[in-house]
Structures are given as C-alpha cells and as structure tokens.
Amino acid sequence: MAMSSSMPLLLPPSPLPTLFVILVLPLSLLLLLRLGLKRNNLRARTHDMPPSPLKLPFVGNFHQLGSLPHRSLHALSQKHGPLMLLRLGQVPTLVVSSPDGARDVMRNHDQVFASRPALKPAKVLFDGTTDLALAPYGDSWRQLRKICASHLLSSIRVQSYRLIRQEEVGFMIRKISSQASLTTSVDMSEIFYSFANDILCRVVSGKFNREEGRNVLFREPTREFSVLLSKFYVGDYFPWLGWLDVLFGSMERVNKSKKRWDDLLDGVIQEHEDRSAEGDDGEKDFVDVLLSLREDPGGNHALLTPQTIKALLMDIFSGGTETSYVTLECAMAELVRNPRVMAKLQHQVRGIASRTKGTVKEEDLDEMAYLKAIIKEVLRLYPPAPLLLPRELMEDCQIQGYNIPKKTRVIVNAWAISRDPSHWEAPDEFKPERFMGDGAMDFKGNDFEFIPFGAGRRICPGMSFAIASLELALATLVYHFDWELPDGMTGEDLDMSEAFGVVLQRKQRLHLVAKPWSIGQEEQHL
C-alpha cells in the first residue's frame, strides 16, 4: 500500500494534445524573438541556478519528456547533471537524479521541500486535497499523518491484519489452482490485481461475501482513478489556459469519477455507522477506526470530516492496489526469466515452510532472507513510482551551491537513482544477492541510493503493510507451484518493456503456466 510518495501523479507520457499544440505554436513563434532579445539578461539572473536543457518558447522542456519520462529525464541528467532546472510550461521544475540530491531534498532540507503542488484533478477528487498523499504541508497534514501512522498503519495494526493476509493469499492460491486445471496458462496480471484490490477492500471496509461483489465495486473506480491521475491537465502548467481542460472534457471525466467515489464510499461509511449503532464488535477495519477516532473527545472530530475520511480511503485504494500488483507481477516475471534465482528461492521457502505442515506462515518469513532480497531487488529495478510524487518548495533554498526559488516543483527520479552505476554494480541486472549480508541497503528512507517508498516527512506510511502482503504472497506462490512460460517461451522471449502511467507497468500482461507442487515431489528427488 504505497500511499504517500509512490502514487505518481505528475508527468504524462504525451503532455501536449494535438489541439493544444495547434493553439500554442503560433504564440511560441511570436515569443521567440522577444525571448531571444532577453537572453543575455536571463543568463545573468540564472547563473547560480542548476543547469537546464535547451527550452522551447512557451512550452519549455515538455518536448523532451518522451513516452517514458523517467528514462528521458535520466538521459538528460547524464548530459546536464544530477540537478536540473526544467521549465514545464510556466512551472519551474527541479529534477533530482542522484542520492546526494535526494538526501538534500528529503533530509537536509526536508521541511522546506515537504509540500505538494495544487494539481487540478487532486483538488476535485480530494475535495481541495484533504487527503494525505497530495495535501500541502501544514498542521492538518501533520495531524492526518499522525492518525495514519498511529492508528491505521502502525506495526501493531499491520500485525493485526495477519489473518486477513493469510486468508486472501489462500484464496489466490485456490483461484490459480482452479484456473491451472482448466487452461494452459493463467493470466497472472489479473490474478495479482484482484488480490491487491481484495486485500485492501477487506482491510478498508471489512469482510465481504464474494457473491455480493463488494470487492469488485472498487476495481473499476480504482482503475479509472489511476488513468485520471496520469493525464495531462493544461491548467497545471499554464494556469491561464485552464479553460482548455473543460473544453477537452478532462474535468468532466474527473467530476464523474468523483461522484462515483462519493456514492461508493458514502454507502460504505453509512453501513459502518449503522453497524456501530447496533453494537457490532466484529473485525475492525480502517473505516471503523476512523469513525471511532472521529467520536474521540481528544479533538479529531473537526479534522476527520466525511470528505477527509473519503479522501484517505481513496488514497489507500489508488496508492495500494496498482503498486502492489505491479510489484508482484515484476517479481514473478523476473523469477521465470532467471531459473537459478527461482530454484534458490523455492529451495529456501519449501525447506522452511515444509516444517509447518505444508503452508507458508508469516512467522516463517523472518527466516527467508533470500525472499526479502528478491523483493528489494524488484523494487530497485522496478520502483512502482519511478518519479516520486512532486514536491513544492515552500521558500527559497540553496542546495549544492545552487539557488532554488520558492514555488519550484521538485521531482526525484527514483528509477535513475536505483540504476546509477556509480552506486550499483551491473545496475541493469537482476541480482538479489546484492541485498544479502550485513550492511545491505534498505528501503526505509535512510539509504538514498534506494528510495522506492521515498524518504523524509513524505515517506510512504503504508510501506510496512505493502511489504507484509508482498512477502507472504510471493513466498506462497513459489511454495505451491512450479512456474514456467507458456508455448515453449524462454526467459529471453518475455517482453519487459514498460508502459508509463500512474504506476510503471509492463506493456504486456503476464501469462504463466502453474504446476502444483507437493512435499512428496521434493522427497522423490532426494
């Protein structure tokens, strides 16, 4: 569940719609002469700012983003340096592509870099950014963060959902077994998306009857939410042209999604209020916790409005579903591409889990060092949010000798940092062993070479919850099945090309052949 720093609402892969280009290109040509006349004065004013790639009049550096912005920005940083000052439309944007730069932004000067820009879809979807992920830094955000850290996502609370994780993983395994007996291959992308959605649905809104279909109700709104957060909104970069978002129909689509979420979550909240009034003391989910805190005389009532509660729940679904499923998908893809790693992991997991009568238990996971190393390596190669959520500088600041003006937007390229050859040997290779042994890097925000969940005040509060689910799911998958690619494919045939969106996904769905395994098979090989 990556809520706060890895739900990447920021740079669209194709940020200039055709009609927009037609409208602005004439203006760009008119501005070119004027800007050329001012070039000498501009150089004098910006000599103490970070280097910048060549900008076009009016649109700035938009033309250099490409279809995969994290890769395009990485290539630009290799030419211009790990700190670059771009201009995206009218918005100055600092791009950070090194561990030292990330440390400056997220630790040394974390407080002044801790805010978020006010983005158009977020203001609608989150009622003026009353959520946690995209709210500006301030007292309300700090109180909300404290509520999440202490009551929703604390280590005790995460542990309390152990049975839910076990049951949902068990359901996933039975689903795979059923499909594997009927077809030659299983659509693991759909399996993983359903698993990530269902476990969040259970934790957020309580136990459900699958025949009722409550879990399914959240799937399409969550997918649509992800699409909306990855779209380009003219007004976010050219405020005086914001009317184009209405003309293109972008805001109408956002408003429809907002209405759909309101109707869905209002019903869930009302159901919980009715159940509470009846004295139901069953399994406590996130909605139960938030409603009880709202009635707490300690003073959370004013903060936990219906709008804020709904915004928090939307954060959890949007930040948790796709990031978890994509990480599982990439993990399984890399394992089938690397049979040696798969065999080593299965040997470890089966050796430990077989002692507990043929099932993986959460208490076994602490012994599975190689499993943990594999998940870290997957997060290094495929950070769900390759570009961390944008920050906004609250006051003028100087880092690494450069002056950065107030209101500058800041993007940390976590993908580039985790593939930096000056910090990682063979950075493009899948080598889980790099995370084995004492002193290995971790993702908890202290090692700035490896920040898939961000760092500092804005580090993802759902990190522990996400890792607990990922570890149990992956261990159970490799315990119960042997895996191979369909139709005689080899690892080299598997397409790992990327599709940029709200999370970084593989272009192709993952289809695998699952062959059930039992302890008896292991004994036959001994």
Image: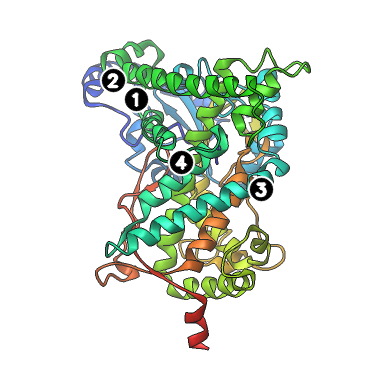
The residue wearing badge 1 is 59
Report how far apart the C-alphas of labels 2 and 1 lie in the structure. Answer: 8 Å
518 is higher (above) or lower (below) than 330: below
Residue at 40%, 33% (x, y): give it: 226
Quick check: marks 2 and 1 in contact, CB under 8 Å? yes
Left or right: where 351 falls relative to 320 = right
> Judging from the image, what secondary structure is the residue with disc 3 in?
loop
Left or right: where 460 falls relative to 85 = right
**In x, y percent, where is residue 290?**
64, 25
Q: Amino acid at mark 4?
A: Asn
The residue wearing badge 4 is 197
Relative depth, front residue between 301 and 68: 301
Quick check: marks 1 and 4 in contact, CB under 8 Å? no
Relative depth, front residue between 279 and 254: 279
The residue wearing badge 3 is 444
Report how far apart the C-alphas of labels 3 and 2 lie in the structure. Answer: 45 Å
Report how far apart the C-alphas of labels 3 and 4 lie in the structure. Answer: 24 Å
| Label 2 CA crowd tier, 10 Å (few <14, some 14–19, many 20+) | some
The residue wearing badge 2 is 28
Q: Amino acid at mark 2?
A: Ser
> Judging from the image, what secondary structure is the residue with disc 1 in?
loop
Relative depth, front residue between 128 and 297: 297
